[in-house]
Amino acid sequence: MRSTVLLSLIFCLFLSCKEKTKDTLPPTLETKTIAIEYAKGFTIEKTGSGVTIITVSSPWPNAQTNFKYALVPKDKMASITLNKEEYNAIIGVPVNNIVTTSTTHIPSLESLGVIDALKGFPDTQYVSSVKTRELIAAGKIKELGNNESINTEMVIELNPEVIFGFSINNQNKAYETLQRSNIPVVYNGDWTEETPLGKAEWIKFFAPFFQKEQVADSIFKEISDAYNEVKSMAKNSKNKPTVLSGALYKDVWYLPGGNSWGAMFLKDANVVYPWSTTDQTGSLNLSIESVLAKGIDTDFWISPSQFTSYQEMEDANRHYLKFKAFQNKNVYTFAKTKGATGGLLYFELGPNRPDLILKDLIHIFHPEILPEHELFFFKPLN
């Protein structure tokens, strides 16, 4: 009998210890994948314990390494243990003190209602947003030099909870210095996306850092619904005008490759783009002769570099006068839509609002479809 009792006590102690050990284990990392419809460069997973795991696979073109970030609710930081070796950064959320490095990040922060968290930015003169410029003027967003050689001493003094980094490769010494100072750098690769809605969906990348996922989902749904609606309207048009893009820089004509972000807008606007069958996801570099051969008789011409008037184009190169679109005054530019300090709103807001870009283009190419639309980015040359 005593042996039975002793065995029972030992068994109970074993169970008790086992149960106690289970309580002290790190939280389960069984994950649920969050739906990302269009963007290819990042994924989001949610664990049962509330940790969000963001994996960035395309921080720059042809990246060979993924970057993995764990976002832990601040009220659970003390009770959750993660293996630091598995992540490029572990960050408590929501964050309220950040640095970001590209103007394309600003519209997402404003839309999410968290722009007040931005404390520093490199090259603030390029920011066009009225609201953010007010914060810069009030000294609430500090100038940090330029992105390639960001002022690390000022960043360390600001002590941000996270830096949203932009880089063309993994050779950024300033970021390495900041990481050694225990300031997390999170790479944002929105600029590597090749589709209009793919770029815009990166608002969902920012949202978990501020615990604003539902807000981001709602905003993106509104943008994607508007985009797809007008895309469908354009698809039904029987008229398919021909369109030229780009201009000369020195002796090279740069225009969108057939699989590029810019070319996708032309495809969705239901026009004929002479270079649509090329494979490039970036720009094509062509001679004036080859552009004349394919584009001299196109009906419209968009994005002629930084030109804002016909006279500027004529003064720069008289070859431009040979194009039918130039002769018929059917040239449209985004270079006239600028912020207070001269920054081009197209490059800052355009990636976040592809619906506005597409509406502009459809109004230009198919005016019968959106007759009441007021041009936002693209304007006729003076």
Image (cartoon, helix red, strand yellow):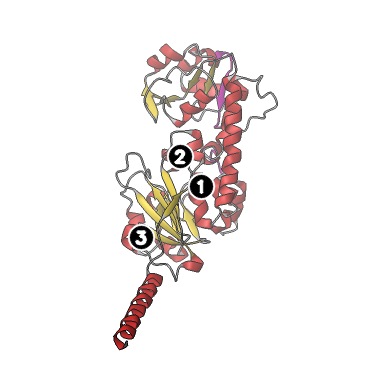
* In this rendering, the label closer to the viewer, 2 or 3: 2
User: Do callouts 2 and 1 mark residues in contact (Cβ within 8 Å)?
Assistant: yes
Rendered view: 122 above or below 321: below
**Measured from the top left, where is residue 115 in percent x and y?**
57, 54
Between disc 3 and disc 1, whose residue precedes? 3
Residue 30 appears at what percent x and percent y? 41, 56
**Dot 2 lies on which element?**
loop
Which residues, given as a range, are shown in magenta? 327-344
Q: What is the distance, in whole Å, between disc 2 and disc 1 at their CAs? A: 10 Å
The residue that disc 1 covers is 204
Left or right, 339 with respect to 20, comes to right
The answer to whether any part of residue 361 appears in the image is no
Number of the front mark, 3 or 1: 1
Judged from this view, the residue extending furthest toward the bottom is 2
Residue at mark 2 to residue at mark 3: CA–CA distance: 27 Å
Q: Which residue is mark 2?
A: 39
Q: Is residue 173 magenta?
A: no
In the drawing, what numbered circle is on residue 179? 3
- Badge 1, how many Cα within 10 Å: few under 14, some, many 20+? many
Are discs 2 and 3 less than 8 Å apart at CB?
Answer: no
The residue that appears at 47% across and 37% down in the rendered structure is 38
Q: Amino acid at mark 1?
A: Lys
For the residue pair 83 and 173, the one nearer the viewer reads as 83
The reply, left or right, for residue 147 in relation to residue 216 is left
Name the amino acid, label 3.
Gln
- Name the N-terminal-most of marks 2 and 3: 2
Dot 2 or dot 1, earlier in sequence = 2
Q: Residues within 10 Å of mark 2 (few under 14, many from 20)?
A: many
**Viewer-proximal residue among 359 and 343:** 359
Residue 59 location, quadrant:
top left
Looking at the rendered structure, the secondary structure element under dot 3 is: helix
